[in-house]
Image (cartoon, rainbow, N blue to C red):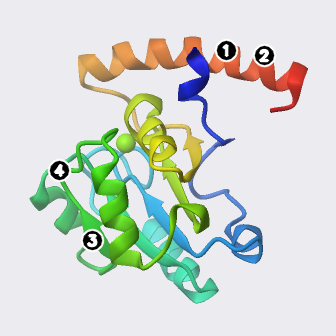
Amino acid sequence: MLRIFYPNECADSAYVIDYKALYEQGYKGLLFDIDNTLVEHGANADERAVNLIKDLRDIGFKICFISNNHEERVKRFNKDIKAKYIYDANKPLKKSYYKALKLMGTKPSNTIFVGDQLFTDVWGAKRAGLKSFFVKPIGPEKEIQIVIKRYLERVVLYFYRKEKRYYKI
Ligand SMILES: [Mg+2]
């Protein structure tokens, strides 16, 4: 039952994923959550984030941000990056993921999602048919509902890791 929440891949950070290898495997679109995935919650894009997106574009990727946060926050993050973006995305609903694919001109089968929350980010990406990377959050959690979600995530991840060891899923 918990399997519906399992990510395809886990990574320590959005900054350590081997994107070049993914591109060579045929992936052409990258869809990123922003808060706690690329920068701390609410922070502006820093040099590391700007450089990552620049490098990814140089590889050939189409980039889009997908955030449940409001327009001002997403626009502010995107100011120097100028990628496509979707705010108030209502993840885990599929609609915004499909919208993002349309903006990038990619398909679920050649697009990767990267995010830090299982029950919004990863679940939504999975429902939309995208490959998902679940990354460790960058900053500390402040909102209580996210703190609670983190406990539940740990339960899912416990079983995910256990099964992965036994069945190599
Ligand atoms: Mg996030």
Place of residue 49 in the rendered image (x, y in percent of width and height, measured from the top left): 45, 66
Residue 45 visible, this orientation: no
What is the three-letter code of the residue carrying label 3?
Answer: Asn
How many numbered badges does the structure rendering display? 4
Tag 2 secondary structure: helix
Q: How far apart are marks 2 and 3 (CA)?
A: 38 Å
**4 and 1 marks in contact (CB < 8 Å):** no
Give whichever of discs 4 and 3 has the lower sequence position: 3
In the rendered image, the vertical position of residue 101 relative to residue 130, given as above or below? below
- In the image, taking residue 77 as reference, residue 23 lies left or right, namely right
Give whichever of discs 2 and 4 has the lower sequence position: 4
Give whichever of discs 4 and 1 has the lower sequence position: 4
**2 and 4 marks in contact (CB < 8 Å):** no
Q: Mark 2 points at which residue?
A: 162
Place of residue 21 in the rendered image (x, y in percent of width and height, measured from the top left): 77, 70
Q: Which residue is drawn at 54% across and 53% down?
A: 130
Q: Distance between the residues labelled 2 and 4?
A: 34 Å
Q: Distance between the residues labelled 3 and 1?
A: 35 Å
Q: Name the residue under label 4.
A: 88
Tag 4 secondary structure: loop
In the rendered image, the vertical position of residue 100 relative to residue 144, given as above or below? below
**1 and 2 marks in contact (CB < 8 Å):** yes
Place of residue 138 in the rendered image (x, y in percent of width and height, measured from the top left): 46, 42
In the rendered image, the vertical position of residue 108 relative to residue 92, given as above or below? below
**Closer mark to the observer between disc 4 and disc 3:** 4
Q: Name the residue under label 3.
A: 78
Q: Mark 1 points at which residue?
A: 158
What is the three-letter code of the residue carrying label 2?
Answer: Lys
- Is residue 110 or residue 22 the one in the foreground? 110
